[in-house]
């Protein structure tokens, strides 16, 4: 039953929006477990909690589909940011063949966070899945997810070490936030492209 529901939930995330593109960074299993538990409760109790189960099921479905929509939107933004990093690098005479020798440091996060009651409720039903952008860093700026994502797009940039990240954060904290075109800068001395996403 869990396996069937897991497969079904993965498909419904995108089918609901007429989209067969895989939705990144969604914890599909939580939705299936919740739904399976509700079905079990209905069967076990003979419909005693029918209205409560129906309400929880409806909320779970709404939160899940809402998260899918947000995730697909975040994916588009992640692709757009990757393409802008590539364009900026080439504009600064960094050939594609040298990308693996070029650091990219992201300051801040592309997604502001999980503010608001709706996001918090989503987090209850789909634990941890409301941070949908790959350009979302865990402190202290140690995540490699953005670089793995860019690699899937065909661009293998060097991953900066913690000392360089800290140096660039201090040196370029005054840059405007993305998507301002001045959010990008290049440090030839360090062979580093810096992108200011947020404070």
Image (spheres, rainbow, N blue to C red):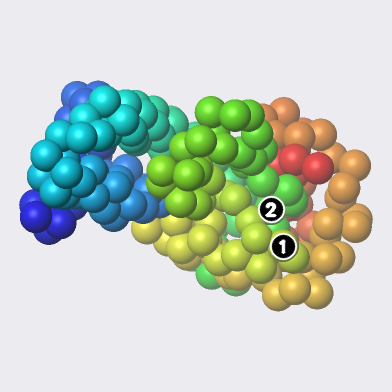
- Is 173 rendered above or below residue 72? below
Which mark lies nearer to you, 1 or 2? Answer: 1
Q: Is residue 164 left or right of residue 94?
A: right
| Image location (x, y in percent) of residue 55 | 32, 26
Residue 118 location, x and y as percent? 53, 28
For the point 82% across and 60% down, the residue is 168
Would residue 119 be seen by someone viewing this image from the given angle? yes
Residue 169 at x, y percent in the picture? 83, 57
Quadrant in the picture for the N terminus: bottom left
Quarter of the figure with residue 140: bottom right
Can residue 83 be seen from the camera position used here?
Answer: no
How many numbered marks are there? 2
Q: Is residue 173 left or right of residue 115?
A: right
According to the image, label 2 marks what residue?
A: 106
Q: In the image, which disc is placed on residue 139?
A: 1
Q: Residue at x 73, y 48 (%)?
A: 108
Q: Secondary structure at mark 2?
A: strand
Q: Please give the label number shown on residue 118.
A: none
Of residues 12 and 56, the one nearer the viewer is 56
Q: Label 1, label 2: how many angstroms apart (C-alpha)?
A: 12 Å
In-image side of 47 versus 152 (left or right): left
In this rendering, position of residue 141 left or right of residue 72: right
Badge 1 marks a residue whose secondary structure is loop
Q: Residue at x 37, y 58 (%)?
A: 152
129 vs 1, nearest the viewer? 1
Q: Nearer the N terminus, badge 1 or badge 2?
A: 2
Q: Residues within 10 Å of mark 2 (few under 14, many from 20)?
A: many
Q: Quadrant where the C terminus lies? A: top right
């Amino acid at each position: 039953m869990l396996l069937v529901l897991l497969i079904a939930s993965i498909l419904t995330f995108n089918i609901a929006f007429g989209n067969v593109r895989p939705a990144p960074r969604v914890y599909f299993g939580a939705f299936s477990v919740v739904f399976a538990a509700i079905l079990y409760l209905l069967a076990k109790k003979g419909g005693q909690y029918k209205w409560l189960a129906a309400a929880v099921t409806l909320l779970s479905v709404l939160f899940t589909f809402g998260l899918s929509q947000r995730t697909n939107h975040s994916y588009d933004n992640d692709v757009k940011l990757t393409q802008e990093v590539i364009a900026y690098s080439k504009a600064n005479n960094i050939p594609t063949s040298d990308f693996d020798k070029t650091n990219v440091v992201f300051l801040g996060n592309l997604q502001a966070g999980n503010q608001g009651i709706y996001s918090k409720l989503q987090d209850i039903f789909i634990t941890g899945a409301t941070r949908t952008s790959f350009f979302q860093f865990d402190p202290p700026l140690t995540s490699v997810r953005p670089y793995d994502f860019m690699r899937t797009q065909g661009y293998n940039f060097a991953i900066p070490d913690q000392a360089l990240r800290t140096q660039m954060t201090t040196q370029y904290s005054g840059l405007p936030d993305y998507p301002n075109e001045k959010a990008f800068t290049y440090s030839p001395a360090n062979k580093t492209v810096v992108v200011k996403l947020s404070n």
